[in-house]
């Protein structure tokens, strides 16, 4: 985050940025299905964080059926696609090294999950397979990461993948 006027900019120091994120995480985010906070309140470097994502609900997808031969009208129906993540609670660990927010935090699922961007053996979110991490910008936050992971769960390539039993961990 940068502040300034008249063409000048001031870079907000790492600890101030993390304090802002901590305050936002403690207040709650959006609809309450994504949250995060520090692992240890005594960690003066603010490196270790825990995130929680409640899996996305059913996804409503428009299905367009064109019936030209009979009615010459376009009909649009909405159908629900069941998400295997619905209602599940996923715990994650985020590690903000000394280079954060210049570089993204390390992100690892603690809860077992099957997603295309997550290493199946370690639970690490692989930056090369998760666009937000591979195209990281200083303005991005831990909230952005958790929100985007939730969206990724609802994506067609992830929403039907068979999941490990609930309550299992890496």
Image (cartoon, rainbow, N blue to C red):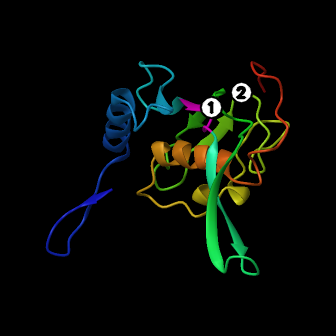
Q: Quadrant of residue 82?
A: top right
The spot of residue 75 in percent (x, y) is 63, 68
Q: Quadrant of residue 71?
A: bottom right
Image point 69% across, 34% down: which residue? 109
Is disc 1 in contact with disc 2, using a CB cutoff of under 8 Å?
Answer: yes
The spot of residue 78 in percent (x, y) is 62, 54
Instruction: Decide if residue 44 is on the left or right side of residue 136.
Output: left
Instruction: Decide if residue 49 is on the left or right side of residue 82.
Output: left
The spot of residue 126 in percent (x, y) is 72, 50
Q: Is residue 127 above or below residue 113?
A: below
Task: Using the image as rendered, state which of residue 66 and residue 151 is in the foreground.
Answer: 66
Image point 61% across, 37% down: which residue? 57
Which residue was labeled with disc 2? 111
Q: Which mark is residue 57?
A: none
Instruction: Decide if residue 62 is on the left or right side of residue 122.
Output: left
Q: CA distance from mark 1 to mark 2?
A: 7 Å
Q: Quadrant of residue 160?
A: top right
In the image, is residue 52 part of the stretch drawn in magenta? Answer: yes
Q: Is residue 51 above or below residue 83?
A: above
| Upstream in sequence: badge 1 or badge 2 | 1
The spot of residue 89 in percent (x, y) is 63, 26
Q: Which mark is residue 92?
A: 1
| Residue stretch rendered in magenta on the structure | 51-57
Secondary structure of the residue carrying tag 1 is: strand
Q: Is residue 57 above or below residue 89?
A: below
The crowding category of the residue bearing disc 2, from other C-alpha atoms within 10 Å (few below 14, some 14 to 19, many at least 20), is many
């Amino acid at each position: 985050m940068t502040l300034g006027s008249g063409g000048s900019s001031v870079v907000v120091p790492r600890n101030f940025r993390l304090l802002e994120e901590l305050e936002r995480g403690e207040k709650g985010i959006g609809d309450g299905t994504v949250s995060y906070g520090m692992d240890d309140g005594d960690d003066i470097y603010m490196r270790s964080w825990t995130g929680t994502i409640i899996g996305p609900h059913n996804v409503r997808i428009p299905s367009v059926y064109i019936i030209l031969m009979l009615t010459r009208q376009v009909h649009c129906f909405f159908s629900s696609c069941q998400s295997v993540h619905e209602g599940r609670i996923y715990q994650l660990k985020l590690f903000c090294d000394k280079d954060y927010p210049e570089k993204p935090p390390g992100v690892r699922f603690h809860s077992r999950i099957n997603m295309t961007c997550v290493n199946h053996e370690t639970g690490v979110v692989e930056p090369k397979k998760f666009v937000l991490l591979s195209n990281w910008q200083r303005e991005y936050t831990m909230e952005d990461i958790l929100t985007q992971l939730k969206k990724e769960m609802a994506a067609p390539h992830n929403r039907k993948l068979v999941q490990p039993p609930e309550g299992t961990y890496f």
